Image: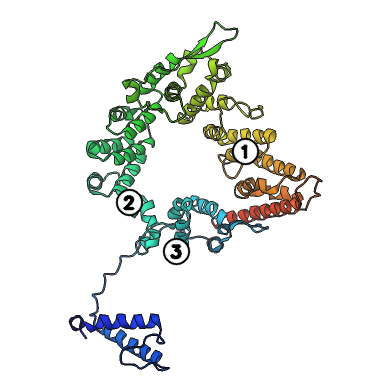
Amino acid sequence: MSRTTAAADPSLPDAWEELVTTALLGTDRRTPAGTAPGPRAPLALLDAAALATVRRRAGLRPARAAERPRPASEDRRPPLPPAAARRLTMLLADRSGALGGGRRGTAPDLMELLPQWLAVANARGFAAPPESLPALLDAARGRTDLRPAVLRFAGPRALWLARFNPDWRFALRSTPGGGTSVPGPHDTDGIRQLWQEGLFAERVALLAALRSREPAAARELLATTWATERAEDRLMFLDSLRTGLGPDDEPFLEEALADRSRNVRATAAELLSSLPGSALAERMAVRAGACVAVDHTRDVPTIAVEAPHECDAGMERDGVVAKAPAGRGERSWWLGQLVEAAPLGSWSRRLGRRTPQEIVALPVADDWQGELHAAWCRAAVRQRNASWSRALLGEPSAPEAGGPGAVSLAERAKLLGTLEAGERAEWVAGFIETHGLSEAFQLLGVCAVPWAAPVGRAVVDALNIARDAGSYPWSFSGVMGLAERCLDPSESGRLDALLAIPDEPENASPGAGGYWSEAFQRLVTTLRLRAAMLAELSPPGP
């Protein structure tokens, strides 16, 4: 029966709907047309449905065959070693980390090891096995933190697959350009055409790629269409200038200070303040310097602060936000922004040629110390100034764990991020040895993985002390989980002595010893598993 014939018979769709309704209600309550109630009614319904199905199918003409999709791009990276491929299958199949709650026992959480496995596999340049791509995309779909590493490891074949499954479309959105190849550095016509005609994600990918290899060319390309871009697009494009930011970008950023979008102006001002030699940085230094001085009339030299009394048009043009957040005074809000944007190198000559340590050690009059030091903290992080970060952090063994500018653990973690990995590890280890683990979780998060020996020793010793003191083991579950992922696998031998169930002190929580023993067994098992994973990902010998 042709499609035309089916369309000409109006009883076909109605008859089918009638059969569906009868099936839903049941033949005891309703029977097919022309059928008497009774035990034969269900059979009659099925016969009628079978006949109607054939009629419906026969009434459709075969569709034209779709064009075969082009094959995925070839992945030229070397394949995984067989043992590593088997390990990947195990990691992707494990769902223990998603169960949540309950006693974990001694089994490692394999899903929490997947990020580290991916990082090593990507660093060593392996290609994903084709049969693992669906599971990899499913894992990345459920965990956004995995997506960058998964998509890098999965390669072009994953993007090819994502076009056929709506559940995996995130891969196309997460990858700038959705796999679109960026023109080569000498293909000026291709670059210009993609910039003028490409989708937004493709243009972002093009600008980022060009900025990484030719910063000036990327900036000049952006300038060609800057005036006609939407405000939200200008903001995204401007953010790409963080890569390779240098003095040559200053004229473009100065023009962006007059942009009609407040967010674009604020971002341009932030980028300019990251260039200590920029004209904006010097203007901010003059403004901040007028507010902060050393008062020599007191018994000891003291920093005196006179916060701005107004936020003029020049300050607003340079990125100062005039309206203070709820609960903040306007003058302190303006002062913090000026100090944060001023080059840190200017304070030595303005405050008596003192070093950062000497400046931070000076008392500050009229309760301005917290505001001033907090602004210096933000400036040290923005300008990546290690000398000021050391001064504001202070000694890790200090009673307040650092200088008064380190107003929070989050601020200390940011300051530590400006230091070299080895120095950062030494400071965090000293902090743990003095203050224990209860305050150290955020600080451990900025230490390089695997943890350096000083950090690893300090964490293990602190956990051992907590266990011997009968502390609640679940109070340290976060640090223990971090240790499973970050402790150097070579440290597993030092933990063997901690596997036995300890004698519980009288004031210990009931059953704490058993929990501690399980936690240390899980830690040792996880470390040994991580060591095996690294060995499996090692390229085969000659």
Q: Between disc 3 and disc 1, whose residue precedes?
A: 3
Q: Between disc 1 and disc 2, whose residue precedes?
A: 2
**Picture layout, residue 27 above or below residue 97:** below
Q: Nearer the viewer, residue 57 or 436?
A: 57
Q: Quote the CA–CA distance across marks 2 and 3.
A: 21 Å
> x, y percentage for residue 56?
27, 83
Q: Residues within 10 Å of mark 3 (few under 14, many from 20)?
A: some
Residue highlighted by disc 3: 134
Q: Relative to 368, is 203 on the left or the right?
A: left
Q: Nearer the viewer, residue 413 or 177?
A: 413
Residue highlighted by disc 2: 177
Q: Quote the CA–CA distance across marks 1 and 2.
A: 40 Å
- Asked which secondary structure carries label 2, the reply is helix
Q: Which quadrant of the rendered structure holds the N terminus?
A: bottom left
Marks 1 & 2, CB-CB < 8 Å contact: no
Q: Nearer the viewer, residue 73 or 118?
A: 118
